[in-house]
Structures are given as C-alpha cells and as structure tokens.
Amino acid sequence: MLRTFDLVLIGIMTATAAVTYTIKHRAELKLEEVRRLEAEIKLEKDTIDLLKADWALQSQPNRLERLVNAYNSELQLQPTDSTSLAHARELPMLKSQVPPPDVTEAKVGDAKTGAKSVAAAKSQPIPMPAPREAEDADQIETGALE
C-alpha cells in the first residue's frame, strides 16, 4: 500500500534524477566545446608562431641585401635617411578631408579668364604637419612585430 506521500517522494526523486541527468549532459557538451575551442586556440597559436618564424626568415638582412643586389636595376632602391621618417599625425590631411573650394563670383570670373586671384589662393588652408615632440630615437613606433 503506497501512501500519497510515498508517491510524491518517488515523483520528486524521478524529477531530481532527470534534472541531474540533463545538467550532467549539458556539462559534458560544454566540456567538449571547451576542448574544441582549446584545440582551435592551440592551432591558431601554432599558426602565429609559424608565421612569425616565416617572417623572421623572409626579413633577414642578408637575404634582403641579396634580393636588393639581384633586382637593383629594376627597383633602383635608395637607403632611407632617418630624417625622412614621419609620424602619421605629421602627414597632410586626406583628400576626403580637404574642404571644398568656395565658389564666389570673383572666383568664377577668374576661372572664366583662366587666371587665379591671389586672394583665392590664400583662402585655401594649406595642411601643415603637426609639430614633433621631443622623442627619444629608440622610442619611435615602427609598427614592427614584437
């Protein structure tokens, strides 16, 4: 003779077992996903290491010097002076950032005759590089890999 209380306890135990099984199953699926992601991360790290090694081989100075000597007639490369390096903030503005010219009657009249007025030429701002800050020569950002 089963009492109502026994039936309720059996139902609760069955529900608890079902919930425990689903939680365990989800945990196993998550563990598989974590292992898969770890394998992908390891593969990516190995690929990065391989690419860094390849870059080190490709950019060896003696190899580059041989290539420069071999293709000097086509490339006509010249050494870069350290004074010709510039920061990005020192470059003039992009063509898309240049303000459109003001079209006034005086300029339209000059454009018809083919002459430019000095005032029109002076009204256009000339992009100037930003002043350089005093920097240590060893701290220049080159964008090279670490």
Image (cartoon, rainbow, N blue to C red):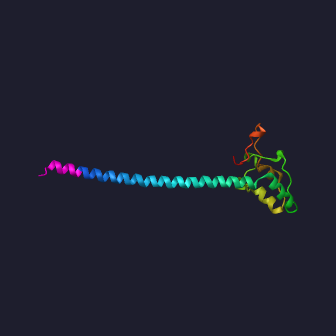
Left/right placement of residue 30 relative to residue 89 reads left
Dominant SS type (magenta): helix
Name the residue: 74% across, 47% down: 142
Instruction: Using the image as rendered, state which of residue 134 and residue 92 is in the foreground.
Output: 134
Measuring 72% from the left and 54% from the top, which residue is drawn there? 55
Give the farthest residue toward the right. 73
> Is residue 76 inside the magenta stretch?
no
Q: Which residues are magenta?
A: 1-11
Q: Which quadrant of the view contains residue 104? A: bottom right
Q: Residue lying furthest left in this view?
A: 1
Task: Name the spot of residue 84 as percent of width and height, x first.
Answer: 82, 47
Q: Position of residue 16 (x, y in %)?
A: 28, 50
Q: Verify whether residue 6 appears in magenta.
A: yes
Work out whether residue 35 or residue 8 is closer to the camera in this orientation and state it. 35
Left/right of residue 69 with respect to residue 43 in the rendered view: right
Q: Please give the name of the residue rendered at 77% of the width and 37% of the height, measured from the top-left corner.
A: 136
Residue in view at x 22 percent, y 52 percent? 11
**Residue 122 seen from this side:** yes
Is residue 98 among the parts visible in the rendering?
Answer: no
Residue 58 at x, y percent in the picture: 75, 56
Number of numbered discs overlaid on the protein picture? 0
